């Protein structure tokens, strides 16, 4: 065995190009499939990982719905009760939302939707949220990269993808309201996301455009599923760590499983078809070398 290893080592050093080619044919497919699977897992943000950009440091996120009562809740979306009777159209007040929470809870406004931003080519439709990012409840929601957070109604912060910086002015909404960019913030887990952040009443003039008006809540004790169900009774949706615990475990879809299986099969076939002949040639050469050694009188050494 030691003689075979010495011969293999000597042959590998002599034919460095062939050795490198064999290693590449074996290692490259493995590297590719490892890279693809790693990218797949890291690019997909789970519900729990993305919770910070929805909750910040708050205990509970409250969103309004178009229904008088929510029967079931998944993620931060509510399924209406029965035939989905619409609410009476009267906006839920902060006091009414607080009445459904633990005594002593503190709420701050948090609305999300989209807004039109005027550009040289017309209007760019981007995401928008209305919240005071200076409040401790928003910690981690939109980390500051440059400048400062908005402190007045005519100030906004933008994500890097917007291509604006502190001191720039932009025109928002179809009424072309002029506001000043005072800060650049990060949208967690997505550097390509376009978003504008301002105070309530600045960006989302038409609440029908909002994907959810609501609040962030700081509760004396950790928010429970019972708190969420109490909100559901009046058509509100609650998002918290308790909601995350109630979410069913997600599994890979059939398409994903089939895709991974095909990729693994292709890697195996490539290894067999490319590296196999190289090993076969190497095996024939080993056999020839061993035959030469045997012809010179060397014998197989036995143990014991």
Image (cartoon, rainbow, N blue to C red):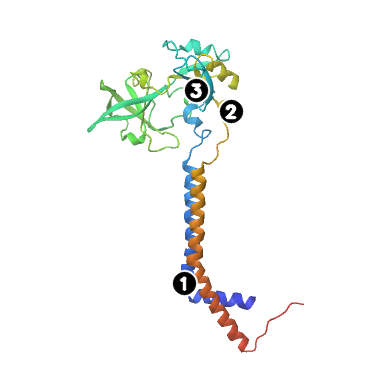
Circle 1: element type: helix
Quadrant (top left, top right, bottom left, bottom right) of the N terminus: bottom right
Image coords of residue 153 (percent x, y): 34, 19
User: How many angstroms separate mark 3 from mark 2 (CA)?
Assistant: 14 Å
User: What is the number of the mark on residue 134?
Assistant: none
Q: Residue at x 50, y 48 (%)?
A: 258
Task: Look at 51% across and 19% down and name the residue there.
Answer: 217
User: For numbered disc 2, what is the local secondary structure?
Assistant: helix
Q: Can you see residue 300?
A: yes
Q: 158 above or below 131?
A: below
Q: Is residue 2 above or below residue 48?
A: below
Label 3 environment density (alpha carbons within 10 Å; few <14, some 14–19, many ≥20): many
Q: Are marks 2 and 1 in contact (CB under 8 Å)?
A: no
Residue 144: x %, y % from top left: 41, 31
Q: Residue at x 34, y 27 (%)?
A: 182
Instruction: Name above or below for residue 245 compared with residue 228.
Output: below
Circle 2 or circle 1, nearest the eye: 2
Question: Mark 2 — residue?
Answer: 246
Residue 99, percent from left and from top? 54, 11
Label ID, residue 18: 1
Task: Identify whether 45 is placed above or below 172.
Answer: below
Q: Residue furthest front?
A: 83
The local secondary structure at tag 3 comes to strand
- Marks 3 and 2, the one that precedes in the sequence: 3
Label 3 vs 1, first from the N-terminus:
1
Residue receiving disc 3: 78
Q: Depth-wise, is mark 3 or mark 2 nearer the camera?
A: 3
Task: Mark 3 and mark 2 in contact? Answer it, CB < 8 Å.
Answer: no
């Amino acid at each position: 065995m030691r003689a075979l290893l010495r011969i293999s080592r000597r042959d590998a050093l002599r034919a460095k190009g062939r050795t490198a080619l064999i290693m590449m044919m074996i290692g490259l497919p493995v590297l590719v499939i490892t890279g693809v699977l790693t990218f797949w897992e890291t690019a997909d943000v789970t519900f729990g990982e993305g919770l910070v950009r929805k909750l910040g440091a708050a205990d509970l996120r409250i969103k309004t719905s178009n229904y008088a009562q929510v029967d079931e809740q998944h993620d931060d979306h509510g399924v209406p009760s029965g035939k989905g009777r619409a609410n009476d159209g009267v906006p839920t007040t902060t006091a009414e939302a607080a009445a459904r929470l633990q005594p002593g809870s503190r709420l701050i406004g948090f609305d999300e939707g989209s807004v039109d931003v005027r550009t040289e080519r017309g209007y760019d439709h981007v995401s928008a949220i209305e919240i005071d990012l200076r409040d401790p409840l928003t910690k981690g929601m939109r980390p500051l990269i440059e400048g400062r957070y908005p402190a007045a109604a005519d100030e906004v912060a933008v994500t890097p993808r917007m291509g604006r910086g502190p001191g720039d002015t932009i025109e928002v909404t179809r009424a072309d309201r002029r506001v000043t960019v005072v800060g650049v913030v990060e949208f967690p887990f997505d550097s390509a996301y376009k978003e504008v952040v301002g105070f309530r009443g600045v960006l989302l003039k038409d609440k029908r455009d909002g994907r959810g008006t609501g609040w962030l809540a700081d509760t004396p004790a950790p928010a429970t599923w019972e708190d969420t169900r109490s909100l559901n009774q009046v058509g509100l949706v609650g998002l918290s760590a308790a909601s995350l615990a109630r979410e069913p475990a997600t599994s890979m879809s059939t398409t994903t499983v089939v895709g991974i299986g095909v990729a693994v099969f292709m890697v195996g076939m490539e290894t067999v078809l490319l590296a196999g002949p190289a090993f076969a040639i190497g095996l024939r050469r080993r056999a020839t070398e061993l035959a030469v050694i045997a012809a010179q009188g060397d014998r197989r050494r036995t143990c014991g």
